[in-house]
Image: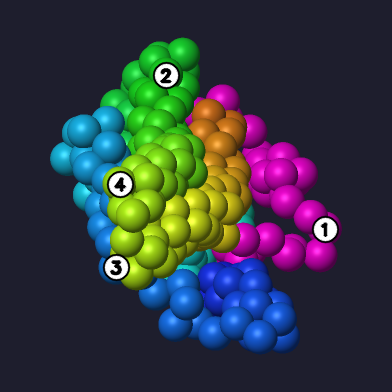
């Protein structure tokens, strides 16, 4: 569990509500079901229209990673690739055909299998980079869903405000009905801005940051596999891979 993600989720909203309370307001003044339907419901409809179902499901999947980020072990990967390199040097590249089945990462397994089959190095790189590009595109698309929600919701807040003002204008002759329309107008705007700037856009940003280490990990796999194929020594390969990370070994897990 990433405690900072949990804190960040409630920190901004908490301070704003506290500020409102200090001014004599209360949370009940912001609970307006009509405004929620207009802003949150309308924005959700725009998102469903904008993205295919596969991307929407991916966005929900990556939401979990915001609070429980996946971990990557850089040092473990370096040791593992070094072991494969030593095996290839001692017994030949063909030995990797059997050993690749024990690889910890599917991308590493693919690369080692291709090397064992005698695939041209250029093609091996293309295969692995294709895998990496697809993974990067998935993360980009998932983050885009939240960013788009943040882009649409303020506009829906304005729509809610206009609808509330229309209600006010139609009931100028009956002052008892003016309050409801004015409430929808102001609260709808707040909902749109809250959803965008305190929740959705930050979620999209955090998803991108979380996966930076994942992509670094996979770039290390590409470099390691190609180095093994080139016949480089295990010690040299380890040095090359360690150049990807900090000397103190930090970054061995994804913490955002």
Is residue 170 one of those drawn in magenta?
no
Pointer 2 residue: 126
Residue 33 circle label: 3
The Cα–Cα distance between marks 1 and 3, rounded to whole angstroms, is 53 Å
Q: Assess whether mark 1 and mark 4 are in contact (beta carbons under 8 angstroms).
A: no
Front of the two marks 4 and 1: 4
Asked where in the image residue 219 lies, by quadrant, the reply is top right
Residue 187 circle label: none
Q: Is residue 21 left or right of residue 144?
A: right
Q: Main secondary structure of the magenta part?
A: loop
Q: Is residue 185 left or right of residue 38?
A: right
Disc 1: CA contacts within 10 A as few (<14), some (14-19) or many (>=20): few
Of residue 28 and residue 195, the one placed in the foreground of this image is 28
In this rendering, is residue 122 above or below 86?
above
Q: Assess whether mark 3 and mark 2 are in contact (beta carbons under 8 angstroms).
A: no
Asked where in the image residue 155 lies, by quadrant, the reply is top left
Image location of residue 182, percent across then percent down: 44, 59
The Cα–Cα distance between marks 2 and 3, rounded to whole angstroms, is 52 Å
Image location of residue 92, percent across then percent down: 43, 36
Of residue 172 and residue 187, the one placed in the foreground of this image is 172
Q: Residue at x 65, y 78 (%)?
A: 20
Front of the two marks 2 and 3: 3
Residue 170 circle label: 4
Of residue 22 and residue 100, the one placed in the foreground of this image is 22
- Magenta segment boundaries in residue numbering: 229-256
Front of the two marks 2 and 4: 4
């Amino acid at each position: 569990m990433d405690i900072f993600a949990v804190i960040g989720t409630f920190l901004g909203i908490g301070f704003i509500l506290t500020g409102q309370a200090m001014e004599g307001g209360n949370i009940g003044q912001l609970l307006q079901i009509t405004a929620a339907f207009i802003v949150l419901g309308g924005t959700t409809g725009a998102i469903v229209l904008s993205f295919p179902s596969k991307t929407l499901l991916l966005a929900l999947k990556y939401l979990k990673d915001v609070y429980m980020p996946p971990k990557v072990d850089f040092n473990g990967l370096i040791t593992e690739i070094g072991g494969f390199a030593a095996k290839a040097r001692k017994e030949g590249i063909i030995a990797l055909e059997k050993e690749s089945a024990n690889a910890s990462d599917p991308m590493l397994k693919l690369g080692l299998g291709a090397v064992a089959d005698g695939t041209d190095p250029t093609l091996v790189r293309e295969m692995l980079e294709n895998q990496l590009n697809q993974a990067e595109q998935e993360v980009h698309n998932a983050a885009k869903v939240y960013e788009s929600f943040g882009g649409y919701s303020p506009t829906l807040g304005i729509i809610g405000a206009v609808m509330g003002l229309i209600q006010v204008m139609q009931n100028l002759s009956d002052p008892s009905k003016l309050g409801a329309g004015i409430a929808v107008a102001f609260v709808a705007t707040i909902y749109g801005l809250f959803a965008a700037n305190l929740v959705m856009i930050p979620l999209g940003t955090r998803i991108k940051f979380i996966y930076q280490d994942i992509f670094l990990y996979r770039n290390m796999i590409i470099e390691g596999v190609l180095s093994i194929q080139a016949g480089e020594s295990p010690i040299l390969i380890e040095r090359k891979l360690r150049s990807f990370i900090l000397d103190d070994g930090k970054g061995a897990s994804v913490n955002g």
